[in-house]
Image (cartoon, grey):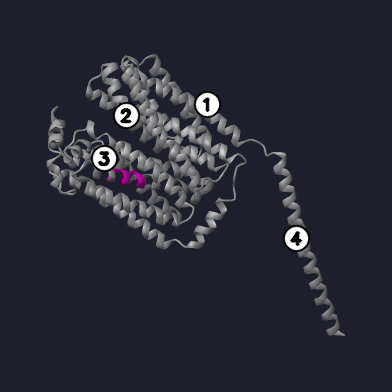
């Protein structure tokens, strides 16, 4: 029951993380207005969040191996709560970027620690629970725009309009803003209530983590940890490097497609804005639906099968986009298939690797750094190339190239994981077995001598 309670709390935390990540997009215009800036001059906020996520993954990976994991996750949720409460009060762009970076660091700790904790709790039974964890995140990302629309109301569309000369006005007002406070109530109170409601939810989840920390006994955590650390693959570091590259291209392609899908559909395909926005909805809808179905299929399909099916779907959908990228029907079908294909590789890869080697906090941090680098590098490179070649579907080419790399890297990972043990290791195992046999023989002989002495003393007593 304690394991199930821990899993439910983790799913609630990932649901809040998905809502908190996705709420930034619908409220980005209001936050920019709140700090007297426009969207184009506030793009550093996404770089700060990515850098914070990378630092959080790195620091969290080291802390997971030297302190209680439940307590660390509770502290990360508390940092996320504080940053969520303070973001609508920020009146300067620098303070807003700092708060978003702190939020990204808490995301990195929670994402890394949640995966490690699920693997440590369930072991071989972790695939379905890992899928449930990521389904909660996808569900939160899907619900965030709806919650923002309900919280901000129809007034948001009118207030979010920024005139072309807003940036010069902000520059002229920069000298006058020195006397303004760093923190103040926003002009739109709906923005405050939206972030306050999300922050309250995250606060409740953090309190559940602290309650769970008080409930769990240290003996149970130590026994689970020692059992998990006994397994280590022969080429552990090579597997980590290959999984690093796998997530680099997988996460990079996912972020690239979702970031540039709207502009690609409107400029190159000729769709209107309403249809282009529907493409994003169909991508995240199939993404969340397939993650929900994966919870049931994880019991009858192995992680290898799910990753192979995802790679095939990604290659097929990207190839159709390359060949027929100007077809509206092809774009709808390929986007839905691509969203479904990108749903399962992330949790399935962790569950698959756990079968061959133990993923510690440092290992998970190394893997998540690869995902963070792909999150920043591939979209940035795609944007530069798209600006140089505006008539070419660079976004589609980038996703197709990433799909090829992931399809090639995974068989290499499987080959490295299933390599036979070398002779040198067999000799070491033989020497270890001989030492254990010698120790057992010595112990047996000492026990025999003690037994003979007891028998001798008993015979003397009888005599």
Q: Is the magenta region chiefly helix, strand or loop? A: helix
Q: Disc 2 designates what residue?
A: 259
What element does badge 1 sit on? helix
Query: Residue 405: horizontal and vertical position, in percent?
Result: 49, 26
Q: Tell me the magenta residue range.
A: 99-106
The residue that appears at 29% across and 51% down in the rendered structure is 81
What element does badge 2 sit on? helix
Q: Disc 3 designates what residue?
A: 23
Q: Is residue 50 above or below residue 447?
A: above
Task: Give the farthest residue toward the right.
Answer: 463
Say if mark 3 contacts mark 4, CB within 8 Å. Answer: no
Label 1 or label 4, whichever comes before in sequence order? 1
Q: Is residue 97 magenta?
A: no
Task: Give me the C-alpha separation between circle 2 and circle 3.
Answer: 15 Å
The residue that appears at 59% across and 47% down in the rendered structure is 231
What element does badge 4 sit on? helix
Say if mark 3 contacts mark 1, CB within 8 Å. Answer: no
> Residue 383, which numbered label?
none
Task: Give me the C-alpha separation between circle 3 and circle 1.
Answer: 35 Å
23 and 39: which is toward the camera: 39
What element does badge 3 sit on? loop
Task: Give me the C-alpha separation between circle 4 and circle 2.
Answer: 64 Å
Q: Name the side, left or right, on which 38 lies relative to 317.
A: left
Q: Name the side, left or right, on which 349 lies relative to 166.
A: right
Task: Give me the C-alpha separation between circle 2 and circle 1.
Answer: 25 Å
Q: Disc 4 designates what residue?
A: 440
195 and 30: which is toward the camera: 30
Q: Disc 1 designates what residue?
A: 408
């Amino acid at each position: 029951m304690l394991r199930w309670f821990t899993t439910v709390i983790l799913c609630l935390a990932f649901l809040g993380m998905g809502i908190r990540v996705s709420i930034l997009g619908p409220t980005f215009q209001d936050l920019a207005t709140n700090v007297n800036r426009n969207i184009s001059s506030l793009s550093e906020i996404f770089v700060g969040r990515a850098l914070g996520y990378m630092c959080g993954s790195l620091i969290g990976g080291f802390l997971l191996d030297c302190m209680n994991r439940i307590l660390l996750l509770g502290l990360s949720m508390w940092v996320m709560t504080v940053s969520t409460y303070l973001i609508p009060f920020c009146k300067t762009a620098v303070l807003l970027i700092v708060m978003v970076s702190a939020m990204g660091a808490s995301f990195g700790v929670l994402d890394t620690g949640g995966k490690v904790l699920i693997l440590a709790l369930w072991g071989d039974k972790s695939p379905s629970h890992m899928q449930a964890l990521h389904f909660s995140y996808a569900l939160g990302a899907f619900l965030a725009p709806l919650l923002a629309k309900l919280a901000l109301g129809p007034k948001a569309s009118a207030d979010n309009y920024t005139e072309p000369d807003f940036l010069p006005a902000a520059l002229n007002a920069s000298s006058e803003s020195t006397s303004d406070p760093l923190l103040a109530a926003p002009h739109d109170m709906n923005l405050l209530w939206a972030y306050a409601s999300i922050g309250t939810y995250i606060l409740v989840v953090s309190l559940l983590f602290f309650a769970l920390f008080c409930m769990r006994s240290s003996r149970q955590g130590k026994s689970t940890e020692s059992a998990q650390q006994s397994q280590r693959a022969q080429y552990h570091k090579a597997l980590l490097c290959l999984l690093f590259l796998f997530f680099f291209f997988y996460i990079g392609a996912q972020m690239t497609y979702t970031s540039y899908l709207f502009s690609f559909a409107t400029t190159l395909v000729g769709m209107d804005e309403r249809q282009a926005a529907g493409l994003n909805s169909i991508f995240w809808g199939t993404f969340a639906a397939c993650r929900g179905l994966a919870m049931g299929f994880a019991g009858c399909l192995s992680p290898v099968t799910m990753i192979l099916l995802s790679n095939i779907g990604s290659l097929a959908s990207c190839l159709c986009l390359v060949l027929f990228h100007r077809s509206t029907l092809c774009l709808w079908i390929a986007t839905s298939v691509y969203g479904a294909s990108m749903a399962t590789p992330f949790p399935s890869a962790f569950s698959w690797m756990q079968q061959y080697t133990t993923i510690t906090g440092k290992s998970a941090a190394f893997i998540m750094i690869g995902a963070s680098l792909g999150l920043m590098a591939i979209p940035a490179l795609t944007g530069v190339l798209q600006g140089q070649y505006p008539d070419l579907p660079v976004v589609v080419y980038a996703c197709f190239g990433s799909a090829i790399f992931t399809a090639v890297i995974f068989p290499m990972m499987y080959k490295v994981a299933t390599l036979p043990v070398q002779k040198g290791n067999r000799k070491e195992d033989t020497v270890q077995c001989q030492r254990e046999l010698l120790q057992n023989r010595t112990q047996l002989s000492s026990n025999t001598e003690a037994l003979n002495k007891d028998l001798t003393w008993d015979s003397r007593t009888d005599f």
